[in-house]
Image (cartoon, helix red, strand yellow):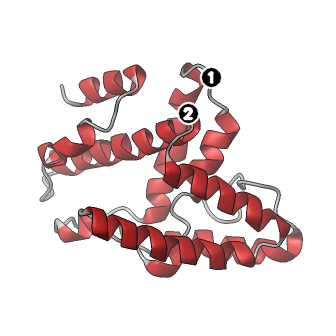
Amino acid sequence: MTAETMDWPLPIAEKQFDNAAAVVAGLYTIPRTGWVQRGVDNPESVGQHTDALVTLARELGPQIAGLDQKKLERMLQIHDWPEALVGDQVAFSSTEKQQKFLVERAAMQKICAALGDEGAEIMNLWLEYTDGQTGEASIAKQLDKLQALMQATTYERAGQTVRARDFVHYRAMITHPLLRQMLAELEK
């Protein structure tokens, strides 16, 4: 998926389209920090990660009752947009996580300010994702962890310097039965 071919999160006015396209295009140039830190050759980019998440959502979302499928996909499409400005930051402690949120929120506000009226809707969707309290946000966050485990497994099986078992803390964050089933299949 590229900036020109993606199914945009919201209808974006033509004059703001270039602003949004630049954000999305930038995500394909940013390698995922966790993979870089683990010494992975040719690590997936943030944009590739987003594509994989949207694909998972399209495959699994319809099997999860009560979800707004379009909202889930849109949420995943924009969840990492701040990284176009601030990079892919890894945070472990609660202090680091709070700082990351503040930096990313400021970046997202800057991005959304350039998107006109649609920017406010995108910002609200991003805040909903970060809060994680709605059904769509909860599943989006779980898919994010599942995709990371899938990617770690792919790298490990390809002989890269990654061990999927190092992501045990992600397993606990995946709680939906369908996603737990996918995780069990992955770990076979």
The crowd level at tag 2 (other Cα within 10 Å; few <14, some 14-19, many 20+) is some
| Of the pair 184 and 121, the residue shown nearer to us | 121
Q: Which mark is residue 66?
A: 1
- Identify the residue at image location x=41%, y=21%: 178
Element at label 2: helix
What percent of the width, then of the height, locates residue 173? 31, 38
What percent of the width, then of the height, locates residue 140? 50, 42
| Of the pair 132 and 40, the residue shown nearer to us | 132
Say which quadrant the C terminus sits in. Answer: top left
Q: Evaluate whether residue 169 shows in this view.
A: yes
- Identify the residue at image location x=80%, y=63%: 118
Q: Amino acid at mark 2?
A: Gly
Q: Amino acid at mark 1?
A: Gly
Q: Which numbered disc, 1 or 2, marks the residue that appears first in the sequence?
A: 1
- Identify the residue at image location x=71%, y=51%: 7
**Residue on which the image places disc 2:** 135
Q: CA distance from mark 1 to mark 2?
A: 8 Å
The crowd level at tag 1 (other Cα within 10 Å; few <14, some 14-19, many 20+) is few
Evaluate if marks 1 and 2 touch, with contact meaning CB atoms under 8 Å apart: yes
Left or right: 161 in relation to 110: left
Say which quadrant the N terminus sits in. Answer: bottom right
